[in-house]
Every structure is written in structure tokens, then in C-alpha cells.
Amino acid sequence: MAKSICLYFQIHQPTRLRQYRFFDIGKDSHYYDDFANRTILRRVAQRCYLPMNEVILGLLRENRNFKVAFSISGSAIEQFDRYAPEVLDSFRQLAQTGQVEFLCETYNHSLASLASPVEFSHQVMKHKAVIEKCFGQTPAIFRNTELIYNNSIGEQVFEMGFKGILTEGARHIMGWKSPNYIYACEGRKKLAVLLRNYALSDDIAFRFSDRGWENWPLTGEKYLGWLKNSINEAGDVVNLFMDYETFGEHQSAQSGIFEFIKYLVHVVQSDGAFEFNTPSEVVKKYKPVDEIDITETISWADEERDVTAWLGNELQQEAFNKLYGLYEKLSLINDSMLWNDFGHLQESDHFYYMCTKFFSDGEVHKYFNPYDTPYEAFINYMNVLSDFILRVNDEYSIIDTTFAESAEKEEVARKVTSKPVVKKKTTEKAVERKKVAEKPVARKSSAKKTAK
């Protein structure tokens, strides 16, 4: 029986913040750089989304056995709808083939799974609804922001009804185990865990156009040989997970990346050793070989494969804690505009920009960072957050005052309605007067008395 290749692409575009100065706090509550958001989205659409969707659509039509999966954040879908609706239409074309699976994630590509189970669940359900609306699919497989995962997150995802979850096959977690098998969540055997083969995924995502790489240039035949070697050692499925922007944006069209993916699909299908399956198909096809116990939180970011890219320094932690510290007040206020801004301020990118790693992963962080330094990112974000906190507190004070007044009125009313009737003390004089008043009065006879 042919082994499986599970090809999955992540798509996300952050809602970038404008340069927000200290003197804007309390005066201007529009936080977003609409020009940058539109410009960058249109650029990536022309370089990546539209041409790569055309390539994928051609491959799907040429061979009904070719399958692929996508996850598109709610923030990206909002920007597609606003700035490039043709991109959304092209993804709908892919969905109509019946060979594409759309996964569920947090709507705002957030770190809510590390902060608030209630907010995490809310964002997942919100994203699930938008996928159903846009593509006519009800997601059965979940991928958390940046493949962040631990046992607790797995339990929450299982409770929300998903059949499987994607995460990183991190070496320090896997040990001697192979990422090329399906595993089950610790304590939740019915939740399948699909692990990314990071070595083979990164060969395409990061090393493809690197002329200094010892394996450059990468060809379809060479890569197929690596796939066979990986799976022959141990495994059922090779999970190739990467950013969709790899094609045309991170790896330019001039590098030959589009031709590579087309030829790779051709040689894989001609060879017959592998077949392409979506995550849902993989979960149905293979049984978990074991439970996987992941107590440390992992992700697919950086060499450490942990969450230090977003929460590794005091700047990030302060911003994170202040933001999620507003959740209780926001729940009481329940204002749609505040919720919307809260969602965009949760996007993991804002915390990623504050990362102070300048060594092994410095270039990666610099590529995605619109700020010159992480300190600029922190100051700008905290200025925005300060204004947001003012808005939240203003709305909360209105509710608090209204609640206090209502409570005071209820207390007064309660005292009035529950006040006992106090009977006056009956004195001896009062009793005497009552007796006199109640004593019958002798009526005078109308007949005259007879003299004796």
C-alpha cells in the first residue's frame, strides 16, 4: 500500500498597526495602517496567492488523486474580502474541486490558547463559522496558531469536537520517535496528532533558493528520494507543513519554486510509492501508534520550537498580560467594536515583532518585522493598548455606575417593601378611653314617670 504525503499550507496576514504616538492616546482610536495592509496584501496576492492558486488548481484538475489542505486565518479572510476579493474567489474555486480541505484555527491567529480557555473557544468557533460560510466545509481538523500545542490544548480541542490536530515534530519532544506516524493526544485517544516533518518541510520553505546550501539546487527526483528514505526508516505519512507565502514571496518566482512544486507532484504520482491525502483522510486511513505526552508547550517557530518567539522576554509578557487582563471587563461591557479591536490586538504578530532574538533566528524575525527594533514595536503597541484600556475603562465605568445606581434603587425598594408594621404600644389611659367609648349609653325613656 502506498504511503501518504500530507501537504498543508498556512495563510495569515496580520492587521498591522499604524505609527501610534503617545499624544494620540485618548484622542484617536483608529489603530491600523490601512495603507500598509492594503499594499502588502496586494503585493503578496500578485506574487503568491493568485499564481500559486492557479498552479494548485491546474494540478487538481490534472489528477483527481492530488489533495492539499489550507488554513486561512480570519484576519486574512477579512483583508481578502476588503482588498483582494479575487483571492477569496480563487480559494473558493479550489474548494469546489472537492480535493481541498480547509482546517480550523483561532480566528485572529492569536495566543488565546495560552491565556484564556473561554476566549480560545470563542475564536475557534468564530473561525469555524467563517470557513463554513466562505467554503461550504465544516472543519474536522484543527491547527493552532503557529502549531502551538501541549496536552491541555489537545484536551480543549477534543472537547470542541475535532478529530485531529496539527503540531510540530520537535526533536526534543519526539526523542527516538518518528514524526511519520499518527499519534493520539495524551488522555484523549480519539484525538489524532499529526506531526510536522520539519526537516523536509524546511528544505522547501527555507533552503530551496539558498545557493550556499550543499543540496542546492533541489530537484523533484532528489526530493522524492529524501521522502522515500524518511518513510522507509519508519512511518506511514510524511507531513509537509509550511507557509503558503513560501511560494512566490519568501522564495521568488525566479528561484523556480512554482516549477518545482508542479514537477514534484508529477514525479511523486508517476513513481507510485506515495499518494497525497488531506489531514482528515490521513486520520481515517491510519490508527495512532501510541499516545504522545507533551507537557511543555511547543510550536514550529525558531530553533527552540517553543513559544519564546512571542513570550520570551519581559516586554512581550507585559503586553500579553495587560491585554488579557482586560477580558473580564470586556465580557461585562460586551461591545462589538471593543471586541473587534481586542481580537486584532491579540494577533501573535504584534508579540513576534517584540522578540529580542538576534542570533540564530535573528534574520527570520527581521524579515517579517516592520519595526527597526523590538523596543519600537513594544512602545507602539503599548501606546495603542493604553488608548484601548482607556476606552474599556470608560465603558466599564458607565456600566459600573449604572449597576451601582440600580443596586441602590433595588436596596431602597427592598427596605420599603420589607419594612415591618410597628404597632403602637397600648397605654393604660388608652385602654380606659377605649372602655369608656365602648360602654353602652342608656337611652332615656320617652314615657313620663308616674308620681307615687
Image (spheres, grey):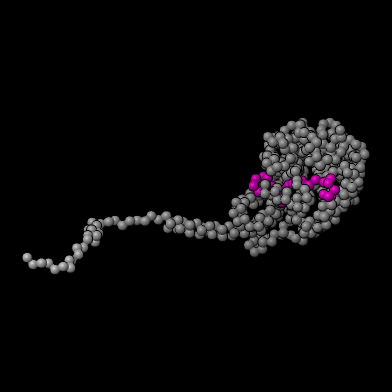
Q: Is residue 76 left or right of residue 392?
A: right
Residue sitting at 72 percent across and 59 percent down?
Answer: 32
Query: Can the viewer see residue 75?
Result: yes
Q: Position of residue 85 (x, y in %)?
A: 81, 58
Residue sitting at 66 percent across and 58 percent down?
Answer: 337
**243, above or below 289, in the image:** below
Q: On the rendered image, what quadrant is the C terminus found in? A: bottom left
Q: Is residue 140 left or right of residue 431?
A: right
**Residue 84 highlighted magenta (yes or no):** no
Q: On the rendered image, what quadrant is the N terminus found in? A: top right
Q: Is residue 375 left or right of residue 53?
A: left
Tally of marks = 0
Q: Is residue 92 left or right of residue 267?
A: left
Q: Position of residue 382 (x, y in %)?
A: 66, 55
Closer-to-camera residue (1/263): 1
Which picture quadrant has residue 101? top right
Q: Position of residue 372 (x, y in %)?
A: 75, 54
Residue sitting at 64 percent across and 52 percent down?
Answer: 323
Q: Position of residue 76 (x, y in %)?
A: 76, 53
Closer-to-camera residue (31/432): 432
Closer-to-camera residue (147/55): 55
**136, above or below 176, in the image:** below
Which picture quadrant has residue 139? top right
**315, above or below 2, in the image:** below
Q: Which residues are magenta?
A: 94-120
Which picture quadrant has residue 293? top right
Query: Can the viewer see residue 211?
Result: no
